Structures are given as structure tokens and as C-alpha cells.
Image (cartoon, coloured by chain):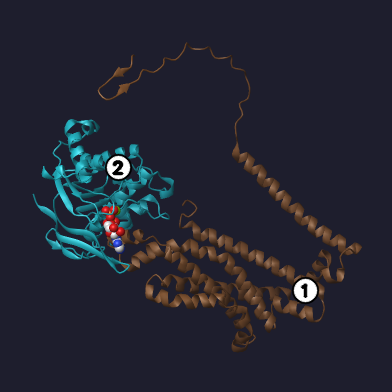
Chain colours: A brown, B cyan
Amino acid sequence: MESVQKKGYIIHKLEAAGPAVPRPEKKQVEPFIQDEEALARRTKRVISFGRLTVALLIVLCWELFTRIGWMDAYYWSSPVRILTTTWTQITQGTLLEDIAYTSSSTILGFVGGTLIGSLLGLSFWWSRKFAGISEPFLILLNAMPKLALAPVLVILLGIGFFSKVALAFAMTVVVAALSAHSGVQSVDKDMEKLMYSLGAKRHQVFTKVVIPWAMPWMISSLRINIALSLAGAIVGEFIASSHGIGRMVIYAGTILDINLVWVGVVVLSVLSMVMYMGVVLLEKWLSKGYGMKKA
Amino acid sequence: MKTKIEIAGVSKWFRRDGQEIIAMQETNLSIEEGRFVSIIGPSGCGKSTLFNIIAGLMPPSTGRVLADGEDIIGKTGHVGYMLQKDMLLPWRTILDNIILGMEIRGVPRKEAVARAQPLMDRYGLKGFGGHYPAELSGGMRQRAALLRTLLYDRDIILLDEPFGALDAQTRLTMQNWLLEIWEDFRKTVLFVTHDIDEAIYLSDDIYVFSGRPGRIISKISVDMPRPRHMEDTVSASFMELKAHLLDLLSGKPSAHIS
Ligand SMILES: Nc1ncnc2c1ncn2[C@@H]1O[C@H](COP(=O)(O)OP(=O)(O)O)[C@@H](O)[C@H]1O
Ligand SMILES: [Mg+2]
């Protein structure tokens, strides 16, 4: 076909393709198939293996160095001694009860603080005036080192269980409130508009849009809060207590039983890790209902 | 024909930084039942403001807004409203998004699903009900958003640049899809766009707004026969009208005479 000249434009002729070149004889080679999944699986295996190796190495070196005297066994204890001390504490002491005591005050404070804080943060959606008045006080509370309040709380609420819960609560409530508040502030105004145009009442906008919208913000505060809550409970036990891992550590320190201090540290680390994993599971469960992995 | 929406002397003023700004000058519109009416105008001329007023989301500074002879100033729930952003809730499936309006009205879920399902099957969302919005293309999401508006079941539907964020190809498909729905349901449609071709291709009537602050400078009826086809968009009368609208929008004085 020749190029055609129209009024105002030209339709060009395309070059015809050359004579067909015969394809080279196909050799029977296995084609290379890129398999990202297999690659990811292998990487994951290597990572797990590496982690395990590093952990074993640390424990082994610790044990070895304290035995040959490169590390002073009096201060550093050693994995084997820590294990034996733990065992005697479980069988002859009150270690299990202490663990139960500390974890229950931590969890109660965490749940209470997160729930009440989140509700407070969400309530700011209902009134901009209320939110505006409250905000500076919330920021002030957040800046205040709440652990410094521990002696007051213990004097106020006694040396029992309740003062530990209160301290864990105080550590978490403000963070939860601030997170929920950020979530509420991020709600798309057009989304609210659309809801009203569909005839929604305010409480319907709140339950159908505001709460789920703020959910990721509230969830993101959980991981920080579980650690804060544990810190609050332990400091409460440091101040004055007759139970708990925190009390055990302080007691061991005063009688210079460093092995026992190490037992406390290890137990608290494990406890903290278990609770962290619990929170991760909780996060997964909460997120599931909100299709957030998709968005 | 029966007048569906009557807008008389409606204007809107805002105050910002202590300055009074006029978003829309006094506007009169009278929309007849069952018509497809487009509003075109440069951005910032107050088209969305007008829609917010009709939807009852903000009161006008002056004037009256009547739907079926009833005053609807500040009253939501008389019209279906759809924005350029699809505004689907990301944590709800497409089906649950589509029945949102019915859910708010308290229609039992079973009944709502029974009404939504045939529409989804018929209008291109078959099999997508269980997906989340993030898994769908922009065009599909706009379909879902429009079906949600449709199932809210008002006689009047406001569409504010619904296809503005779509690519040209998808936009064409969506225009034909919208026409198909409109032929089936015969709702009164108010359609904002700043795409002249789109306005001509879809509309019975076109209102042209001037630049900021907006006021109506022309009303044009398009009497090209329906159903319309893609070839119509290159017909001589289409081109002529397009040139006329371009003149109007660019403010050429000659255009106002005709
Ligand atoms: N809440 C508001 N406060 C102050 N000015 C506003 C507000 N809403 C809209 N405007 C102004 O009104 C004018 C019209 O806006 P809009 O209706 O969104 O225009 P369009 O939809 O035609 O692009 C713009 O100049 C905009 O800045
Ligand atoms: Mg607009």
C-alpha cells in the first residue's frame, strides 16, 4: 500500500517484512525457569539455620569463657549455672508463682490500658472541641516519666497486686490513646461525606468507618505497649512487693546472689518474648477482619 | 416533562483567612425527570460545591433547592452521590461495599445480597463479590461504586467526575457501560466532567459554567439519537458542537451570541 495524502494528514505505508528466515534447528535444552518461590524457601532455610547457629555459638562461648576464666564467672554466671539455679528455684523456690504474678499484672495492665486508652482516643472523633481541649494534656502525660510515679502509686494502692497493675496501666494508656487519636484524625473526610450522603447517622459513620479505619493505628501500638506494660509491672515490684520476678531480682541483688539475678534476667527475657509473640498473634487475628493485608 | 430538581438563586460563599470568597454565583437550574444532564466548567468553578448542596451536605448561602417540589436544603438521603475517588471501604469485600447503603437503611443482609447479586452479574462484576477493592482495577472499582449508588435506590444520581481518574481506553468502556445502566434504570443523572467529548457523548442537556466564580453561561440540548455509538463522536454535528463548547469554555465572545 502506498502512503496516502489526506486533507491535513498522511497515512504512512509500513515497510513490508523481509523474506521469512528459517528458524535455527531447535536444540533439546532444558529451558531455564525462574522459580522465585524456591529461591525464597531456600533463603528462609538459610536464615533459620544461621539464627540457630549464632544462638548456640553465644551460649557455648559464654559457657566456655567462664570456665577457662576469660570471663569472671562470679559476675557473668554461666548457662549451666543459670539452668541449675532455675531448676532449684522451680522445685524448691517460688519461681513459677513469681512468673504467674508478674505476667498477670502485666497482662491486666496491658489489656486495661489499651482498651481504655483506645476508647479515649476514638472518642475524640465525636467532638473536635473535646479533642482540642484534651490534646495538650495527653501530650503532657505522655512526656511525663510515669515510672517516677511508681513510689506514689505503691504508697497510694499498697504493696499488693493492684499497684503493679496500676503502673502497667499507666504506662500503656496514654500511648494507646494517642495512637487511636492519630487513627481517627486520618479518616478521609470524603469517606464521611459519602456515608452521610447514603443517609448514615453519626453513630453509623463511627462504627462502620471510624473504628475500622483507626484499627491499624491502634494495632500498631500493641507491640510497644506490651513491653511498656512489663516494664511498669517490674518497676512496681522493685519498689515494694512480696511476689514477682522483679522482687526476686532485687532480693538476689541485695544478698549478692548473682546467679539468681541472671535467672531473673533470663526468665524476664523469655517472658517478654512470649508475650510479644502473643501480641503478634493478636495483631494477626485483629487485622484479619479488616482485610488489611490486601490494602 | 416533570421537573425533578429545581435550583433557584443558589449561591455559595466561604470565608477564608478573613476574606469572603464566592465559590458559586447565583445559579438557576431546572432538571427534568429521567434526563442525563452534564455540567462542564473549568476546575474550581463550584461544580462539587453545587453537588454538595444538592446532596444536603452543606447549606447554600442563598436560594432554594427542591426535589419533587420538596425543600431538601441540609437534608441528606434524597440523592445518590458518587465521587471521583471510588470511596470503597478497603476492609470490606466488593459485595459488602455495594450493599453499604442498604445496610445503613437497615435492609436485612440476605435481602440486600439478593438485590445486589443480579446487578453485579449483569453489569460486569460477576465473580468479584468476594474480592477486596485493592484487588480490582480502577474501572472495576468505579463500577462497584456506581452500583452502590444505584442500589441506594434514589431517583436522582449525582456523579462528580466519576471517570476522571481512569485511562482513556477504560473511560470509553465505562461511558458505554454507564449509558447501558441509565437506559435500563432511567434515573435522573447529574454528571460533572471537564471532558467535553464525554459530556456530548453522554448527555441530553449540557450546562456550561464559567470560570471562577462559576455561573451558568449556556444550556445546550444534544439531540443526537440514542443509542449512540463511537462513530457518532466523529460526526460533523458532534465536531461542531465540540468547537462551540470549546469556544464557550475559553471565553470567546462570539460563542455567547448563538
Ligand atoms: N470548605 C471550603 N472553604 C473555602 N473555600 C472552599 C471550600 N470548598 C470549596 N471552596 C472553594 O470553592 C471553589 C469551588 O470549589 P469546587 O466546588 O470544589 O470546584 P470544582 O468542583 O468545580 O472544581 C474553589 O475555589 C474552592 O477553593
Ligand atoms: Mg470538583
Q: Position of residue B233 (x, y in %)?
A: 23, 34
Within 10 angstroms of label 1, few (less than 14), some, or many (20 or more) residues?
many
Give the label on residue A238, or none.
none
Q: Are marks 2 and 1 in contact (CB under 8 Å)?
A: no
Q: Is residue A39 left or right of residue B41?
A: right
Amino acid at the residue labelled 2? Tyr
Q: Which one is nearer the viewer's eye here, B192 or A70? A: B192
Which residue occupies the foreground of this view, A11 or A86?
A11
In the displayed structure, would residue B69 be above or below residue A107?
A: above
User: Residue A86, located in which quarter of the rendered image?
Assistant: bottom right
Q: Position of residue B134 (x, y in %)?
A: 43, 49
Give the CA separation, mark 2 to mark 1: 70 Å
Seen at 66% across and 44% down, the residue is: A43
**Residue at the right extreme of this rendering:** A68
In the displayed structure image, the side of residue B210 where residue A55 appears, left or right: right
Residue B148 is at least partly visible in this image: yes
**Residue located beneath label 1 in the image:** A261
Disc 2 target residue: B123
